[in-house]
């Protein structure tokens, strides 16, 4: 005879949960919610069932229902924190976890302080992050694997990669056979520009253990080294093991584009079914925007109109019109964003750009001045403020005071400089492995090297870097910039990127800025003879002239003649580009950005 008493049904549901048969348990538990008086354990198990099936919004609904019936239970607070973490709501998780610490500081385990540290960094609450970091170090036993790993992860997250690598080496010495420790060490080697060393670790690991993160980071290292076909293979493997890891799809599409596989560069997004989620669809749509496939982007936005409840859908639509030169349609969309949403900084900036294109210079200037006050370090806002200021008021930044041109090897004779060119140029040319120009890059008729050029151990590249180091230190001093924020502990500039560009046959750079740098620069290695014609000024560097989508044009503030082994340094928010040259000759350069050393000042 079947026993259908509430107690028997609850016990049956509990057994289903223990056996991980959550859907069976749910059916019984939902029936039990209708009983009176309500039983707290029923809601607790319902939350657990939904959570374990990754139905986090449903789990949250059951949790809210339980707090209305049985308030102030310890399990509810713990589960609520876990749920917001699973939902990716960093701000909510941080607020709840921080509140849970009040009065419990002395009892909290180090893992809680660690989590608070990393959440604070993600939310850019850097003062709080430093405090939580110090609190965690007080609790953690020194010189243990956990101590080294925590320091490693902390310095990685605040982007002080050299310090993170030092702690990674200590963690590795304490646990040299652990695959996770080896994997993290390889990632940090790559982030420090040591892609070859990263590859030497990741390659054997990938042969022993199949995991999407290993294949993904192996492909990253191969991409940095210009092994693009190998990178395609391993990004594809990473996607097979985890089709939902969007970064692999984005990186795969970028490499396929550079290999000129432009018809199929976005295939993985669709074959993996990523377009059913907002995150996946927006990553796919971003790639269409970068590839300048504006009409196709609008077609896809129309097909996935159910995502139009989200602001970013409208931002993409506006950007497709603006980049396609339809500023009136873009303006309509931007006005809709302002009426319907609390527009992001990015949306407000892009609306300002559209206002510039439609001749609303004073409106753009006012909006950009307000944005500069909100985010004073945003380099793109500074660049467009300069544009709007020139158009609305006739003046912006004093560009002629924000750059420096200097020879790198003044002690060398002309013959010695030519010998240096003859030795360095073939080294740089050998690193240009791309078939096509990078997606969403500013160069036309050219290629760009992969990875971090100045991390190369080649003696010619290191000789060049040492000369550039000295030029940058001089520029920092002359510009009265905060040296502590731009220089690493070893006294060298904190390069956030370095690469070589090879332009051929009417190649040039569109005007652009470097949003992640604070100082940008270029060194000329090989130039066509036409650059010496001071009337035509072909191949010259321009500063201060903005990129224009339509008819809006401004003359450059400054034009700089390139010279072999001369370095031009300038503030990263300055618009810069090159004039096209007619000669079917090579223009070979080395470029770089110096950025802030980590997110948190020392």
Image (cartoon, rainbow, N blue to C red):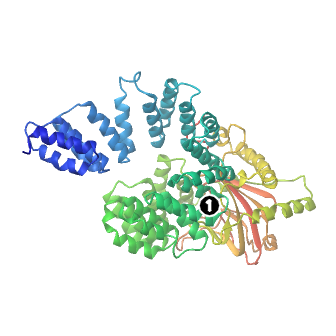
Q: Residue at x 81, y 55 (%)?
A: 460
Coordinates of residue 154 in the picture (x, y in percent): 54, 37
Q: Is residue 510 visible?
A: no
Q: Quick one: quadrant of the N terminus?
A: top left
Give the side of residue 417 with respect to residue 548, left or right: right
Q: Residue 278 sits in which quadrant? A: bottom left
From the viewer's perspective, tell me whether residue 393 is left or right of residue 243. right
Q: Position of residue 144 (x, y in %)?
A: 56, 28
Residue displayed at 75% across by 69% down: 587
Q: Which of 450 and 44 is in front in this view?
A: 44
- Observer-nearest residue: 565 or 56? 56
Q: How many labels does the image show?
A: 1
> Can you see residue 25?
yes
Query: On the picture, is 137 further left or further right than 25?
Result: right
Expressed as whole percent of the image width and height from the top left, the position of residue 314 reads 37, 64
| Label 1 crowd bin: few (<14), some (14–19), many (20+), radius 10 Å | many
Asked if 525 appears above or below 8 in the picture, the reply is: below
| Callout 1 secondary element | loop
Q: Name the residue under label 1.
A: 575
Q: In this view, does 443 lie above or below 401?
A: below
Left or right: residue 31 compared with residue 229:
left
For the C terminus, the quadrant is top right
């Amino acid at each position: 005879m079947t026993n259908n008493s509430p107690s028997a049904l609850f016990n049956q549901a509990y057994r289903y949960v223990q056996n991980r048969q959550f859907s069976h348990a749910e059916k019984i538990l939902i029936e039990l919610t209708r009983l009176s008086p309500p039983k707290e354990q029923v809601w607790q198990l319902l939350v657990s069932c939904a959570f374990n099936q990754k139905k986090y919004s449903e789990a949250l609904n059951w949790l809210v229902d339980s707090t209305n019936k049985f308030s102030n239970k310890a399990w509810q607070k713990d589960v609520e924190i876990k749920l917001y973490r699973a939902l990716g709501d960093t701000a909510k998780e941080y607020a709840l976890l921080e509140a849970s610490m009040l009065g419990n500081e002395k009892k909290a385990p180090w893992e809680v302080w660690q989590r608070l540290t990393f959440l604070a960094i993600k939310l850019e609450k850097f003062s709080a992050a430093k405090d939580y970091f110090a609190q965690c170090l007080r609790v953690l036993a020194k010189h243990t694997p956990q101590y080294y790993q925590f320091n490693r992860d902390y310095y990685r997250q605040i982007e002080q990669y050299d310090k993170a690598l030092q702690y990674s080496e200590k963690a590795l010495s304490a646990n040299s056979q652990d695959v996770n420790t080896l994997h993290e060490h390889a990632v940090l080697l790559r982030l420090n520009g040591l892609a070859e060393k990263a590859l030497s670790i990741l390659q054997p690991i990938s042969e022993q253990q199949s995991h999407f993160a290993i294949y993904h980071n192996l492909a990253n290292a191969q991409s940095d080294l210009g092994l693009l076909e190998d990178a395609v293979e391993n990004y594809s493997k990473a996607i097979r093991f985890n089709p939902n890891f969007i970064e692999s799809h984005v990186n795969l599409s970028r490499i396929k584009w550079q290999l000129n596989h432009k018809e199929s560069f976005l295939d993985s997004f669709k074959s993996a079914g990523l377009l059913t989620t907002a995150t996946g669809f927006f990553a796919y749509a971003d790639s269409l925007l970068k590839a300048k496939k504006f009409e196709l982007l609008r077609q896809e936005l129309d097909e996935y109109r159910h995502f139009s409840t989200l602001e970013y859908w409208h931002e993409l639509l506006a950007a497709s019109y603006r980049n396609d030169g339809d500023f009136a349609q873009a303006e309509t969309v931007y006005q809709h964003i302002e009426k319907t949403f609390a527009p992001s900084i990015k949306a407000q900036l892009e609306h300002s750009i559209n206002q510039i294109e439609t001749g609303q210079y004073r409106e753009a200037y006012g909006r950009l001045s307000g944005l500069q006050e909100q985010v004073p370090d945003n380099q793109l806002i500074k660049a467009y403020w300069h544009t709007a200021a020139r158009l609305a008021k006739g003046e912006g930044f004093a560009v002629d005071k924000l750059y420096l041109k200097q020879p790198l090897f003044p002690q060398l004779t002309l013959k010695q400089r030519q010998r240096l060119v003859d030795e360095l140029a073939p080294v740089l040319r050998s690193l240009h492995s791309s078939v096509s120009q990078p997606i969403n890059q500013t160069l036309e008729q050219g290629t760009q090297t992969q990875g971090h050029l100045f991390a190369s151990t080649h003696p010619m590249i290191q000789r060049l870097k040492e000369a550039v180091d000295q030029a940058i230190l001089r520029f920092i001093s002359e510009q009265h910039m905060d040296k502590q924020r731009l220089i690493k502990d070893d006294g060298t500039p904190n390069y956030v990127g370095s690469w070589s560009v090879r332009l051929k046959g009417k190649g040039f750079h569109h005007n652009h800025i470097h949003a992640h740098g604070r100082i940008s620069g270029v060194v000329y290695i090989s130039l066509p003879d036409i650059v010496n014609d001071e009337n035509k000024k072909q191949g010259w560097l321009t500063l201060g002239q903005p990129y224009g989508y339509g008819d809006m044009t401004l003359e450059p503030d400054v034009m700089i003649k390139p010279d072999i082994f001369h370095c031009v340094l300038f503030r990263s928010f300055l618009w810069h580009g090159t004039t096209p040259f007619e000669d079917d000759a090579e223009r070979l350069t080395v470029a770089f950005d110096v950025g802030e050393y980590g997110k948190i000042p020392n």
